[in-house]
Amino acid sequence: MSDTRRMLAEMADPLFAELGPNASEERDLSRLEELGLPLLLVSEAEGGFGGDWLDALTVFRLSGYHALGIDLPALVIQRAEGVDRELAMAFARSCQIAGALDAALALSVGYVNERQQFGRPLGRFQAVQQSLATFACEAAAANCAAMGAAQALDRGAADFEIAAAKLRANRAVEVGTAIAHQVHGAIGFTQEYSLQHLTRRLWQWRSEHGNDAYWSAKLGSRVIARGADNFWPDLTARTD
Amino acid sequence: MQTFVTETVDWPDTAPALREQVRTLVAEHGESDPVRRANSWTKADPAFSRKLGEAGLLGMTWPKEYGGHQRSQLERYVVIEELLAAGAPVGAHWIADRQSAPLLLRLGNEELKRRWVPAIARGEAYACIGLSEPGSGSDLASVRTSARRDGDEWVIDGQKVWTTGAHVSHFMIALVRSEEGSERQAGLSQFVIPMDAPGVSVQPIVDLTGAHEFNEVFFEDVRLPASALLGVESEGWKQATAELSLERSGPERYLSSMVLFLELVRYAGAKDDPALAQLVGRLAAEAWTLRLMSASVAAKLARGEDPALEATIVKDLGNSYEQAIPQLVQAAVDFGDAEAEVLHAVCFYLLQVSPSFSLRGGTREIIKGIIARGLGLR
Ligand SMILES: Cc1cc2nc3c(=O)[nH]c(=O)nc-3n(C[C@H](O)[C@H](O)[C@H](O)COP(=O)(O)OP(=O)(O)OC[C@H]3O[C@@H](n4cnc5c(N)ncnc54)[C@H](O)[C@@H]3O)c2cc1C
């Protein structure tokens, strides 16, 4: 990670944690502006932060991690020049999903290590362990996919990668939210407990800017049009 | 918590040229039968292995002194992903090139290295892995095959099972109990056992498809020189488990069914069926993601890190993907359709072999247990 990106993360993380799910634009937008975040993708020449898409990933992911009540990615993308907004928002939701899944996983792991039943922490039970391992794989895939899309955006055209990343993230939502709630038992079903801030947003983000059907149809027809013999050469040419 | 810290993979500048080289080589020699191209890293073809050796595509990262080519880990990664994506028959040398020679180079004495490593790099010497026994599967620390000292020699007695490629291999690296009365992980050592040593016998085990890939291997008073001990006596457990990240995260953990996916793309091209297009899209997204994940682990390994948790995650997701492809294709495609003949054949082959994907190299349950531990559970 570059130094500016680390610095960005170190600024955004505590702020998003403080503002959290109840943040509102009216009250808290100025706090985000103090750090220059809405102008993240505006060039320095024009008074912006001059960030790239990997920087955007870092910020968007953290906004998902803390279930930030303000749609910061929408603000950032509104202000950015020369981007395909629909695609960029799909990318943003993938990053937010990646962050929120990691947060829900952390919450779940913390909870099962604390909560005791049958005289021991739930996390000692193999069935619980195996479920959370499955969850971790899905969260990892969503994170890796978001990263791949960010790298592609920084290289140039990224419509294939964003389609794939949003689709992969969407699929991870299904598994991740189900397991997070299952291991939490009834407490996770309350308004008071923080899991709902993550899972309710995850369900929303899965639908927004392209659900599974939308992206799989788009991606599939594209791959089919290119033909079986081009699939692998195309895939490798994207990164070489 | 960040489950998977991906960093930008710096693909080598030589990647396009290497890909071209492999693609040409495979086109010249490769396997045209799509069924044989599925799960191709279990298909042994010594002639092809020798060809790769001649082309400098085996032992790519090893020192020149031992027949290697001193290229980077990522250059090797490019070559193996190309071979697997093309369904090339790489089974003969696969294990030797992936893990046995690296282990010999790291821990072996000069005699062992000289005897085996250059021959592996030429594509002429093959290896098998002697871990599992009739009483020791997932619970590997319970192995009972024994090594006892007799003067300057070691004497091996016991049995290994499920040994892939023992019948085409020249040597085995075996994990055995070298300290009488020792328990569990203690008292285990690794030995390099030539398959033609007196007292070694190999019995085929035919798998459910009718193929002969794995075996039982028996040891009866097999006498080995002191130099057959690999690394340090009684450190066998640590040695055997140290390089698992290498074994678990490679492209072979997600590409075993790639041929079927490509046949699906071909078939869907002739059908104009939205459901098939969506299936192709979903499987393509997963392939793209898994490639990134696997390459990202390779990049970390190349930097000398040991991303054990990430590697295990790649294996679990990758195996699930390779297993899902035949199931999903079967669910979506009418095999009564004459145009689906190839798809049908490849699919049925993979339906039968795919249960092994989440057994070989550590079962799904054991792998998930390792992930859980990595998350801080138990
Ligand atoms: C195609 C193929 C090739 C192979 N090649 C080799 C080879 O070259 N060399 C070699 O040494 N071995 C090889 N193996 C063996 C492989 O490593 C073993 O099959 C594997 O370790 C599992 O052991 P097992 O088959 O005895 O199953 P078992 O250990 O008996 O397990 C049976 C089932 O119980 C589950 N289980 C076991 N313990 C637990 C637990 N504690 N908690 C929850 N579930 C559990 C397992 O996950 C599995 O689902 C190969 C296997 C296959 C299928």
Image: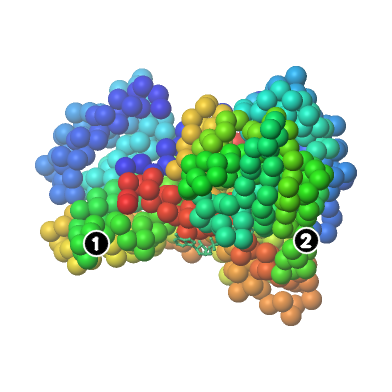
Ligand 1 placement by image quarter? bottom right
Residue A89 shows up from this direction: no
Residue assigned mark 1: A184
Q: Residue furthest bottom?
A: B336
Residue assigned mark 2: B204
Q: Position of residue A85 (x, y in %)?
A: 41, 45
Vertical placement of residue B331 versus B9, above or below: below
Q: Amino acid at mark 1?
A: His
Vertical placement of residue B147 versus B230, above or below: below
Q: Quadrant of residue B250?
A: top right
Q: Residue at x 80, y 38 (%)?
A: B125
Left or right for B46, reference A222: right
Q: Secondary structure at mark 1?
A: helix
For the N terminus of chain B, the quadrant is top left
Q: Amino acid at mark 2?
A: Pro
Left or right for B254, reference A204: right
Residue B167 shows up from this direction: yes
Q: Nearer the viewer, residue B261 or B185?
A: B185
Total marks placed: 2
Q: Position of residue A141 (x, y in %)?
A: 46, 49
Q: Chain of mark 2?
A: B
Q: Residue at x 20, y 35 (%)?
A: A14
Nearer the observer, disc 2 or disc 1? 2
Q: Residue at x 78, y 64 (%)?
A: B211
Left or right for B111, reference A141: right
Q: Position of residue B12 (x, y in %)?
A: 63, 27
Vertical placement of residue B305 versus B353, above or below: above
Question: Mark 1 packing: few (<14 Cα in 10 Å), some, or many (20+)?
Answer: some
Q: Nearer the viewer, residue B118 or B52?
A: B118
